Image (cartoon, rainbow, N blue to C red):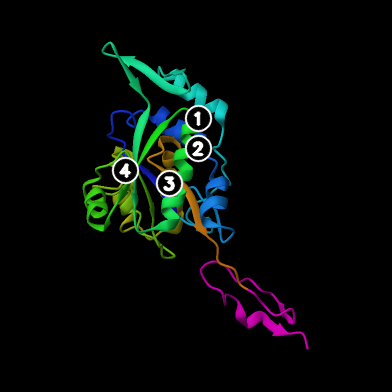
Amino acid sequence: FVFLALNTTNGILSDVNVRKAIRASLDKNRVISNSYGNMYKTSNFPLNTGSYLVEQKEEDYYNIDEKNNLLTSSGWELKNGVWQKIENYKTKMLELNLVVRASDETRKQAAEDIKNQLQEQGILVNIIYADESSYNSYLNNVNYDMMIGSIDQSIAPDLTTYFGYNNLAKYDNQEVNEIMNAVKNMTDSNELKSKYQRLYEIYNDEVPYIGIARNKIIAVKNTELVGDIKANWYNMFYNIKEWYNSK
């Protein structure tokens, strides 16, 4: 799962409208095409699209008009191609630092594309190419405006990385905290779905992260294999007892 973590305690990014504007400025398909290739697809939420816990829609938040409305409503004004506002009698530019691991060429390319897209929309971005030691320091201390990361996830990933204490976005929401505590020992599937669905709604509304992409898993089968084939993302051999060779 490839994503942008937004430091929600940052002076600029503490404004949810700015976070939503950044999301509305990004064409994820362009990032994937330029950096990851056709073995990736757009993705929004940390849980896989196939997870039974959340009914996810194929959201496309890329909307330049919405971006303009969001920033204008928060007092920003586009001047000379850059969004800016007056605070304490001084001009403040909408300018952010983006941290990326210097050793990861794919992420570096994605960071460049994200920077270019945002700057086309009047949002200035400075990329910080961090070596391994510096990157870990940025990560552990959440010492960044934005960070592009990717995490290998299991079938049932632990979402505390995204929503727990000292998470990657310094995101703190009382209802989210209550949900995260409640699901720890919850076994009823309907209750779990209800809690995670609410988490999904809050995530989309408050934008602590911007999901970019997720790698695809492709299964190739012989054309002679027929039957009730229901292979899925978590078990390639699901329902194998119903498969058979047509010859």
Mark 4 nearby-residue class (10 Å; few <14, some 14–19, many ≥20) = many
SS under mark 4:
loop
Q: Residues within 10 Å of mark 3 (few under 14, many from 20)?
A: many
Main SS category, magenta section:
loop
- The kind of residue on which mark 3 rests is Ala
Rendering coords of residue 99 (x, y %): 33, 46
Q: Residue furthest bottom?
A: 247
Specify whether 56 is left or right of 155. Answer: right
Q: Are marks 2 and 1 in contact (CB under 8 Å)?
A: yes
Residue found at x 44% / y 58%: 189
Query: Mark 3 vs mark 2: which is more N-terminal?
Result: 3
Q: Are marks 4 and 2 in contact (CB under 8 Å)?
A: no
Marks 3 & 2, CB-CB < 8 Å contact: no
First along the sequence among labels 3 and 1? 3
Q: Bounds of the magenta span?
A: 220-247
User: Can you identify the residue that label 4 sits on?
Assistant: 169
Mark number, residue 234: none
Q: Mark 4 or mark 3, which has the lower sequence index?
A: 3
User: In the orientation shown, which residue stands out farthest toward the top?
Assistant: 89
Q: Quadrant of the C terminus?
A: bottom right
